[in-house]
């Protein structure tokens, strides 16, 4: 539990430095969609440039129905749009360390939250927010900045089938209803991986979260 009584979650990642991980984004979305929170994704540090793979991921998230923002503290890109989405809402700002969450809070709330640097050797951020911080917004609403997390466990499966809707649909075509998508014959999910229709990474992340929940 990182926050309570909230309306929406902003998942913040950096376009690079540190590189984002799709598996972690899926975890955040699953955790948020369990209690049916509105999910938005912020690709921060847009001034560093958007490569083809990141552009494709952004298109994919938008096609899945998520609102995606491109932001930059350096150029000011996207800050007005994010600020507008916060008005009158109780929002959580979540993401790994080093993605620029504290800098976003400073820009949006005009506060002086301590910011840190990203390690040149590991590309991992230093923890500058060590406990959840609540910021009251001038135009109404509040913004909760939670500590950076690189990993966290999933409790409950409420949001799992929604986030992994493609796997849920494929599972219905498996020969066995209780197919684990590991060794069973006639597994439509593993067949989709073999045929390049489904990412093996995505199936692995789904399986890991299902075991945890």
Image (spheres, grey):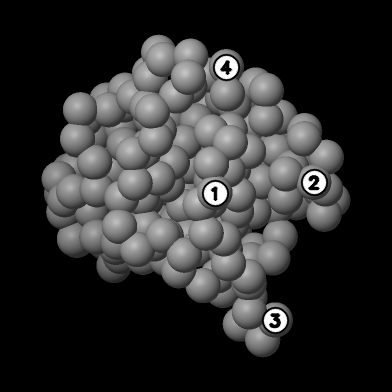
Q: CA distance from mark 2 to mark 4?
A: 19 Å
Q: Secondary structure at mark 4?
A: helix
Q: Residue at x 65, y 21 (%)?
A: 81
- Where residue 83 sits: x, y (%)? 58, 23
Q: Residue at x 48, y 59 (%)?
A: 96
Q: Residue at x 77, y 35 (%)?
A: 76
Q: Which residue is mark 3?
A: 120
Which of the marked residues, 1 or 2, is nearer the chain's N terminus? 2
Neighbour tally class for label 1: few under 14, some 14-19, many 20 plus, Cα within 10 Å? few
Question: Quick one: 51 or 183, which is closer to the camera?
Answer: 51
Task: Please say if the residues under marks 1 and 2 sit with CB atoms less than 8 Å apart.
Answer: no
- Marks 4, 1: nearer the viewer: 1
For this view, does 46 lie left or right of residue 175?
Answer: right
For this view, does 47 lie left or right of residue 41?
Answer: right
- Where residue 168 sits: x, y (%)? 33, 37
Q: CA distance from mark 3 to mark 1?
A: 24 Å
Neighbour tally class for label 2: few under 14, some 14-19, many 20 plus, Cα within 10 Å? few
- Where residue 213 sits: x, y (%)? 16, 54
Q: Which residue is mark 1?
A: 112
- Marks 3, 1: nearer the viewer: 1
- Marks 1, 2: nearer the viewer: 1
Question: Quick one: 15 or 177, which is closer to the camera?
Answer: 15
Which of the marked residues, 3 or 1, is nearer the chain's N terminus? 1
Q: Secondary structure at mark 2?
A: loop
Q: CA distance from mark 4 to mark 1?
A: 21 Å
Q: Which residue is mark 2?
A: 74
Q: CA distance from mark 2 to mark 3?
A: 20 Å
Neighbour tally class for label 3: few under 14, some 14-19, many 20 plus, Cα within 10 Å? few
For this view, does 71 lie left or right of residue 140?
Answer: right
């Amino acid at each position: 539990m990182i926050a309570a009584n909230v309306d929406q979650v902003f998942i913040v990642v950096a376009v690079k430095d540190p590189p984002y991980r799709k598996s972690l984004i899926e975890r955040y979305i699953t955790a948020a969609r369990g209690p049916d929170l509105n999910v938005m994704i912020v690709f921060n540090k847009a001034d560093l440039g958007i490569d083809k793979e990141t552009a494709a991921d952004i298109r994919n998230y938008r096609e899945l129905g998520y609102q995606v923002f491109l932001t930059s503290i350096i150029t000011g890109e996207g800050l007005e749009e994010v600020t507008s989405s916060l008005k009158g809402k109780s929002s959580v700002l979540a993401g790994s360390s080093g993605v620029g969450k504290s800098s976003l809070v400073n820009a949006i709330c005009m506060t002086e939250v301590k910011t840190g640097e990203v390690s040149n050797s590991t590309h991992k951020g230093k923890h500058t927010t060590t406990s959840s911080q609540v910021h009251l917004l001038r135009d109404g609403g509040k913004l909760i900045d939670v500590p950076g997390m690189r990993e966290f466990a999933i409790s409950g499966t409420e949001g799992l089938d929604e986030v992994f809707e493609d796997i849920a649909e494929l599972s219905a075509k498996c020969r066995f209803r209780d197919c684990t998508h590991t060794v069973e014959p006639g597994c439509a999910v593993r067949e989709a991986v073999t045929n390049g229709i489904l990412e093996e990474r995505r199936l692995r992340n789904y399986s890991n979260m299902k075991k945890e929940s």
